[in-house]
Image (cartoon, helix red, strand yellow):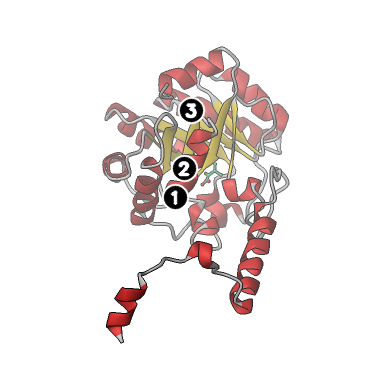
Amino acid sequence: MKNTVTTLRKQKKEKNKITMLTCYDYSTAKLIEEAGIETVLVGDSLGQVVLGYENTISVTMEDMIHHAAAVSRGLKDTFLIVDMPFMSYQTSEYDALCNAGRLMKEGHANAVKLEGGVTRKRAIKAIVEAGIPVCAHIGLTPQSVHAMGGFKVAGKTEEAAQRLIEDAKAVQEAGAFMVVLECVPAKLAEYITDLLEIPTIGIGSGAACDGQVLVYQDMLGMFDDFVPKFVKHFANVGTQMKEAFRAYSDEVKAGTFPTEAHTYKVKEEVLEKLY
Ligand code: KIV
C-alpha cells in the first residue's frame, strides 16, 4: 500500500512509529523500498555524503532534482520527500513555489522539505496552497550553519526552547504535514510531539518523536568524516566494502580474477578466420 500524508497522519494517531531514511540513488532506493521503510528523504545531506562538500550550502536545485528523480525510479510504496536546497526558498514566496514545483515535476517528489519555523511560515503556506505537501525542519537547521556558529544542539536555554516551541506551532499553523526535529533535547522533543497534531520525525531528538530518520551512510557505517552522537551503526558496511575492494585488487594483481566462470567464449573456427 502506498504511504501518503493520510497514512502518515494515521500512524501518529495510532502511535505506530514512522520510519524514514535518506537516499540519493536508484539501487539504494530499491533496497530501502524492499526493507519496508515508509518514507525516504532525498536530503541535501547529499552535499556531504555524496558530493564531498563540508556542508549543505553548495547543493543546487539541479543536484536535488538529479538525485530525486533517480530515487523515485526505485520506489513504489515509499513516500518520497525531497529537500529544498539553500536559497531555493529563502529569497521569496514566488521562488519557493517555483522550486517546490520543480522538485515535484522533475524530481517526482511526493512532498518537499524546508528548514525554519516562524520565519518560513509564508513560504510553507504558499507551497501548501499550491497543493504540495511540506515537511518542515526545525531545531538544528544545517543550512544555517554559519549563522549558528557550527552544528549545535537546539533549545538548550529557556529562551531557545520557547523559540523552538513557537517554530513548531508556526509550521503546523502554516500547513506543514510533518516536521523534522534535529538535535532537540529529548524531553523538549517529547513536549513538542505531544503538543502537535502533525507527526514529528526525530534525528538526535530522542525516542518520543513520532518517527525517526537517519542518513543511510551514517547508520551503515559508510561515512566517518564526522559521526554525531545520535548515530547508531546498524551494520559496518564501510569495513565490508573496504575488504571487498582490497580482495578485488589482490585478485586482479594475482591474475586469479576473472576465472573462466566470468568470461565469454567464442568458437575456435571464428577465431581461426581472424588471423
Ligand atoms: O539532509 C538531510 O539528510 C536531512 C536529515 C538529516 C533530516 O535534512
Amino acid on which disc 1 is placed: Asp
**Residue depicted at 48% across the width and 35% down the height:** 33
Please determine whether, in this image, residue 30 is positioned above or below residue 85.
above
Is residue 90 something one can see in this rendering?
no
The residue identified by callout 1 is: 25
Q: Indicate the secondary structure of the residue bearing disc 1.
A: loop
Q: Which residue is mark 3?
A: 178
Instruction: Give the numbered dot on residue 29.
Output: 2
State the separation of the CA atoms marked 2 and 3: 21 Å
Q: Amino acid at mark 2?
A: Ala
The image quarter containing residue 77 is top left
Image quadrant for the N terminus? Answer: top left
Which class describes the residues within 10 Å of circle 3: few (<14), some (14-19), or many (20+)? many
Q: Is mark 2 within 8 Å of ligand 1?
A: no
Secondary structure at numbered mark 2: helix
Judge depth for marks 1 and 3 and give the one in front. 1
Q: Distance of mark 2 from mark 1, alpha carbons?
A: 6 Å
